[in-house]
Amino acid sequence: MGDRIQPAYLLLGPESGDKGQWIKECRAGLREQYGTDPEIHRFYPFETENGEVLTALGNNSLFADHRLVILSQAEDLSATQITQLAGYLAHPSQSATLLIVSNETSLSAKLSSALPKDQVKVFWEMYDDRKPDWVRAFFRKSNMAIQDDAIELLLELVENNTQELKNTCSQLIQFLAANHTGFADPITEDDIENYVFHSRQESVFSLFEQIATGTLEKALAVLHTLLRSGEGDSVPLLAGLLWQFRRLASFTELLGQGSGTDQAYKNTTVLGKSAALRRKKDQNTYTVAAQRYTLAQIRSIIARLGEYDIRTREMGTDFQQLLLEEFLYVCMEKQGEAPAALPRASFATDARF
């Protein structure tokens, strides 16, 4: 990063790997420019509702000549926060650098128009046709070869950004290094599947996969793993399932309206935003789920998700496991059918003491 670093930048787009590398280079550039490491402050919109980010930008540090302030998930900024930041960008501090970061490719015009074009950078995802060569080159640097079908499977398993791809390839190399030495023994599709089996971590996505394609016993096993690992809190868990069932409802509705399967994969949405099914694994999961559940049943499950969210919040953590197990039963065995209401007992007439 040879040019002098400016007081503010918008860093947009879904390619988090290149974006993260740019931020590292920015930090190194500030170190070179000022002779010391900058003092770093990180914020999210919900942490700066009272102007905390502006305070960090305006207050000189006793320990560093410059401050690097990173505001992530800027797509969640409120209208008031956007107005405040736009006001700051009109007259930014010269002793701080503000990085406004978002996975979206555009933000409010109030922000983008407040900066010169060379201070608004969009990091696009790597084109699909470039990814296989990128993977081959990455393994070649470690004196390893990988077969085409193994690359195809690997790309299906990885989120669509170079940082995630780099992390996964590095972990795979460490996992397979003892059994693959040199280019004469390339990595195969079986090696990838073996790695996935040994490194598999359960999540709300693997729980939905079992709800969509597995049995109640397998879904309960995933749930219990999540609960033991501390990842089974009901609020984010039910929210994650809600998102996926809304996605399934959209996909199933498109099929019912006559869309072809491939077209439905591309046009699936959640709350009006694109949620296209790009990975083959996701496509297979949702195709099976659309065969297992009717659109009416999916909508009923979505209703049950709202009810169980309320119940788990009201009854507290002691009853979370019981309620989540009950939800899986209602979802998978009853296809979301509302359970019959039990008659309410009266202590005045029904108690027997």
Image (tube, helix red, strand yellow):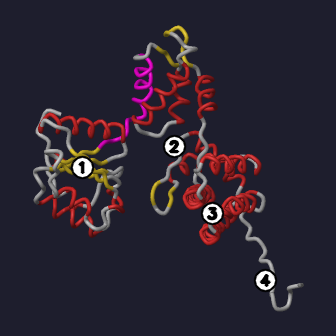
Q: CA distance from mark 4 to mark 1?
A: 57 Å
SS state under label 2? loop
In this picture, which residue range is highlighted in magenta? 123-140
- Tell which circle, 4 or 1, labels the residue nearer the N-terminal end: 1
Identify the residue under disc 3. 317
Circle nearer the viewer, 2 or 1:
1
When asked about the image quadrant of residue 238, the answer is bottom right
SS state under label 1? strand
Write the residue at 38% across / 35% down: 127
Circle nearer the viewer, 3 or 1:
3
Give the image location of residue 329, x and y in percent.
Answer: 75, 59
Tag shown at residue 344: 4
Q: CA distance from mark 2 to mark 1?
A: 31 Å
Q: Nearer the viewer, residue 81 or 129?
A: 81
Give the image location of residue 93, x and y in percent.
Answer: 12, 55
- Tell which circle, 4 or 2, labels the residue nearer the N-terminal end: 2
Amino acid identity at mark 2: Arg
Give the image location of residue 119, x and y in percent.
Answer: 18, 47
Residue 349 shown left or right of residue 119 in the figure: right
Identify the residue under disc 2. 278
- Tell which circle, 4 or 3, labels the residue nearer the N-terminal end: 3
Amino acid identity at mark 3: Thr
Q: Are marks 4 and 1 in contact (CB under 8 Å)?
A: no
Circle nearer the viewer, 4 or 1:
4
Q: CA distance from mark 2 to mark 3?
A: 36 Å
**In the image, is residue 179 above or below residue 64?**
above
**In the image, is residue 83 above or below residue 219?**
below
Identify the residue under disc 1. 99
- Tell which circle, 3 or 1, labels the residue nearer the N-terminal end: 1
